[in-house]
Image: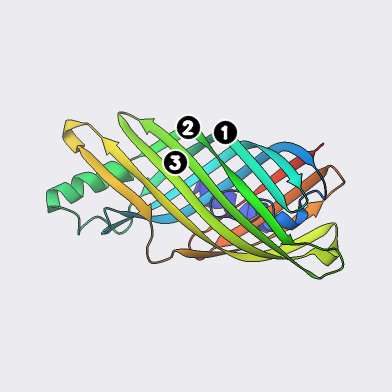
Amino acid sequence: MRHRTLFVFAAAACLLTASAAQAIDLFTPTTMPSSLSAGIGPLYDYTSRTLSVNNDGRVHFATNRIMLEGDFNPASWAGLRVMGGAGDMYFTTPTGFDKIGSPAQAASWQHGVRGFAAPFNFVGGGAVDFAPLRQPSLWIGIGLTGWGLYQQGSRDGASVRLAEYGGAFSLSLVRLATVVPYVGIDYAGIYGDIKSPAAAANFNLTLKNNPDAPIGMFAGISFVVSDHTRLGLEMRFLSELSGGASVIFHF
């Protein structure tokens, strides 16, 4: 409940995050600086989505991530970003694991996963941005993003590892100059596992993205505050209910 309240509050503030991908705040590429530059700044991301467990079960996954992002733009149409920080993880099982293993195994696994909540743990990754169309004389800008993220955590002997990856296509209204609204579609793949060696609830479960909702949509706004500062807000939905915010200082 605390995390849903936080998400709703942030969404009401405007939209949430900065750019074009599933699990992280990525600036829309059409707001990249027009020349060689580097940048650094903080970002916050809230991700809430359903994952598949051993192909038959479903588990709800939520995380708050706070990271530091570093950007490098070798040209006006391409950018490279790396990020690292910490994030928590929460799992709930509203639908149960009734199709996985025996009834006794399913009950044990469901209890173990539902009770797993890791405090702040390592999260990091990177992204590559391309802006094939961003001329100021045109209304529409086109952005492409590819990204990857790794997160791990543990508590009471149980551990979780998640590798996330994906790509996104965005359309931006670049004619507005200092305020750049955008929309797009993205695909996010997730692969990982949750393990517990405890004798009372021993399990090794495979986590994947929900096959019922592989494609997502996003919408956001990038604010070009100055020649050196960019603020981003974004929301992502369909495949997830997520969003975030970020600020990047270029030099």
Q: Which residue is mark 2?
A: 121
Density class for disc 2 (Cα within 10 Å; few <14, some 14-19, many ≥20) is: some
| Tags 2 and 3 touching, CB below 8 Å | yes
Residue at 22% over, 32% down: 197
Q: Which residue is mark 1?
A: 85
Residues at marks 1 and 3, CA–CA distance in whole angstroms = 14 Å
* Quadrant including the C terminus: top right
Q: Between 148 and 211, which is closer to the camera in this rendering?
A: 148
Q: Secondary structure at mark 3?
A: strand
Report whether 110 appears left or right of 89. left
Q: Between 36 and 136, which is closer to the camera in this rendering?
A: 36
Residues at marks 1 and 2, CA–CA distance in whole angstroms = 8 Å
| Tags 1 and 3 touching, CB below 8 Å | no
Q: Which residue is mark 3?
A: 89
Q: Position of residue 166 (x, y in %)?
A: 51, 54
Q: Between 134 and 86, which is closer to the camera in this rendering?
A: 134
Q: Position of residue 190 (x, y in %)?
A: 42, 51
Q: Position of residue 133 (x, y in %)?
A: 75, 64
Residue at 36% over, 38% down: 160
**Residue 25 appears anywhere in the view:** no
Foreground mark, 1 or 3, reads: 1
Density class for disc 3 (Cα within 10 Å; few <14, some 14-19, many ≥20) is: many
Q: Secondary structure at mark 2?
A: strand
Mark nearer the N terminus (2 vs 3): 3
Type of the residue with mark 2 = Asn
Q: Image quarter for residue 71?
A: top right
Q: Position of residue 144 (x, y in %)?
A: 63, 59
Residues at marks 2 and 3, CA–CA distance in whole angstroms = 8 Å
